[in-house]
Amino acid sequence: MSLLSKTSMSGYSFSYSRYFKKGQYNQLLDQRIIELYQLYNTQYQVLELCQIFYRHHELIAKVWKEEDDQQVEKRRDFFVKGVEKYFFKYKDDVMTKYFEDI
């Protein structure tokens, strides 16, 4: 029997071990993100985090180790589109400094 179970949320399916509660799995993902992006002991503005994640979006595949390649690619595509939409919403705002390197 597979250790992974499929769940659907908002029309977007994801996998997580049935031995984890959803909150525990999300904490595991958070920990992977912190380690991969080396976000230790620092507070970030939302735009700063988006910029970091956007620059290194290829690391997303390492966050969702349990996912198949197709699902990870969907996650990456949705993430990139979402960040671009967020960036361009604020591009001409006071926070332009966050976009200088993008």
Image (cartoon, helix red, strand yellow):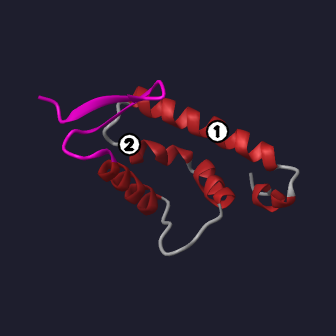
How many numbered tags mark residues here?
2
Q: List x then y, in percent, for residue 26.
A: 37, 50
Residue 11 among magenta residues: yes
Label 1 crowd (10 A; few <14 / some 14-19 / many >=20): few
Question: Pointers 2 and 1 in contact (CB under 8 A)?
Answer: no
Q: Is the residue 14 above or below the residue 48 in the image? A: above
Looking at the image, which residue sits at the far bottom? 41
Sequence-wise, which precedes: disc 2 or disc 1? 2
Residue sitting at x 62%, y 48%:
54
Residue 64 numbered mark, or none? 2
SS for tag 1? helix
The residue that appears at 79% across and 44% down in the rendered structure is: 89
- Residue 13 tag number: none
Kindly report the distance in space between the C-alpha atoms of the residues bearing marks 2 and 1: 18 Å
Q: Is residue 32 above or below residue 3?
A: below
Where does the image place residue 75, in percent across and percent down from the top left?
49, 35
Q: Amino acid at mark 1?
A: Gly
- Asked if residue 53 lies left or right of residue 73, the reply is right
What x and y, as percent, mark residue 55? 62, 51
Indicate whether residue 77 is drawn in magenta: no
Q: Which residue is mark 1?
A: 82
Q: Secondary structure at mark 2?
A: loop
Query: Could you say which is closer to the camera, residue 28 or residue 67?
Result: 28
Q: Residues within 10 Å of mark 2 (few under 14, many from 20)?
A: many
Q: Looking at the image, which residue is at 24% across and 46% down?
A: 20
Hey, what amino acid is under mark 2? Trp
Quadrant (top left, top right, bottom left, bottom right) of the N terminus: top left
* Left or right for 18, reference 35: left
- Magenta range: 1-22
User: Which residue occupies 86% across, 60% down?
Assistant: 94
Instruction: State which quadrant residue 78 falls in.
Output: top right
Q: Quadrant of residue 80?
A: top right
